[in-house]
Amino acid sequence: METTDDGWPTWVPGPSRPRGVETTDQYGPRPDLPRISAGWHNDFQRCGPPENRPESVASRLGLRGPAAETTDTPVMAAHAWPTNAHMIEDVARLGYLRKEWRTLDPTYGRGNFWTRWRPDALVTSDILTGVDFRHLPHDDGAFQAVVFDPPYKLNGTPSNPDIRYGVGEKATRKERTELIFDGLAECWRVLRHGGMLLVKCQDQVCGGKVRWQTDDITQQLAFLGMEKTDRLDFLTTPRPQPARTRADGEVSGQHHARRNYSTLLVFRSTRKVPTSYVR
């Protein structure tokens, strides 16, 4: 649309009449002029020409990532990526991670997330390097992005990855959930206003019920002022499960759908770290 020197639109005659606020002049309705939507008009009056409109917080801090690169294959919300590294590569395509951002991975382990794409300023740690993700040795707001892959299996079954987190012993569901929440609080603390937090987790059956871990994490981070921006489900092929026998000797049947996916939740920090926050 053409504009005057001060940025206001000039009306150009045209055959189309899209729905919206009817344009008029001193003689009444002008059928030869296009209509303009009320919402656009209100935004224009409030903010003025586009070049005068205020930037978002993320844009001012250089945290607004580019849209996904144009390729023949779009990034899907649910996909069977070959590895976690392939998924992280797609996350970067969406702009949730950027090469120039100072990024923290407090659950680095073997570094499997970063074998295909890696930010230039990646700070890594885990329990084997002497850093517990519940007590990070970083200043408040030190990072533009944090990628957190905690031991999220609620049944607490010991495994090699859990040993690398320092939690190889069998744990209760409550203990494992508290561990994750403590880690989330620290990740939030070291993330700057407008920064991105990526959290790996999984909805799962535990104790005969579906435990919606994605909901629990979303609610916990919402309390800390985090906004969920996206969700990527990593489709997998579940391993066979042995038959379970009840106390009466009968084989127990399946009561819930198998969760053949893990999830990467994407959050953006929408408020500053309170000065009253105490580790």
Image (tube, rainbow, N blue to C red):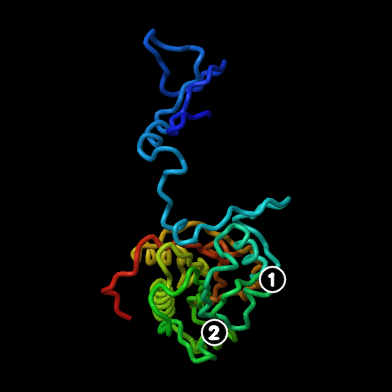
Q: Which residue in the protein does label 1 denote?
A: 116
Q: Work out which residue is located at the far front of the displayed protein and give it.
A: 5
Res 37 label: none
Above or below, 106 relative to 117: below
Foreground residue among 11 and 101: 11
* Residue furthest out toward the right: 72
Q: Amino acid at mark 2?
A: Asp
Q: Position of residue 127 (x, y in %)?
A: 51, 88
Give neighbour class at mark 1: few <14, some 14-19, many 20+ (Cα, 10 Å). few
- Dividing the image into 4 quarters, which one contains the C terminus? bottom left
Q: Taking 276 as reference, is 170 above or below it?
A: below
Q: Position of residue 176 (x, y in %)?
A: 44, 79
Of the numbered discs 1 and 2, the one sitting upstream in the chain is 1
Residue ranking furthest to the left: 276
Percent across and percent down for residue 106 are 51, 80
Q: Residue at x 60, y 67 (%)?
A: 99
Of 262 and 73, nearer the camera is 73
The residue beneath circle 2 is 162
- Is residue 248 visible to the viewer in this orientation of the structure? no
Residue at image coords 50%, 17% = 33
Please tell me whether mark 1 or mark 2 is closer to you in this view.
1
Tell me the kind of residue under disc 1: Arg
**Residue 121 found in image quarter:** bottom right
Q: How many marks?
A: 2
Q: Is residue 262 visible?
A: yes
Q: Residue 186 or 191: which is nearer the viewer?
A: 191
For label 2, the SS is: helix
- What element does badge 1 sit on? loop
Query: Are the residues tagged 1 and 2 within 8 Å (C-beta)?
Result: no
Give me the C-alpha separation between circle 1 and circle 2. 23 Å
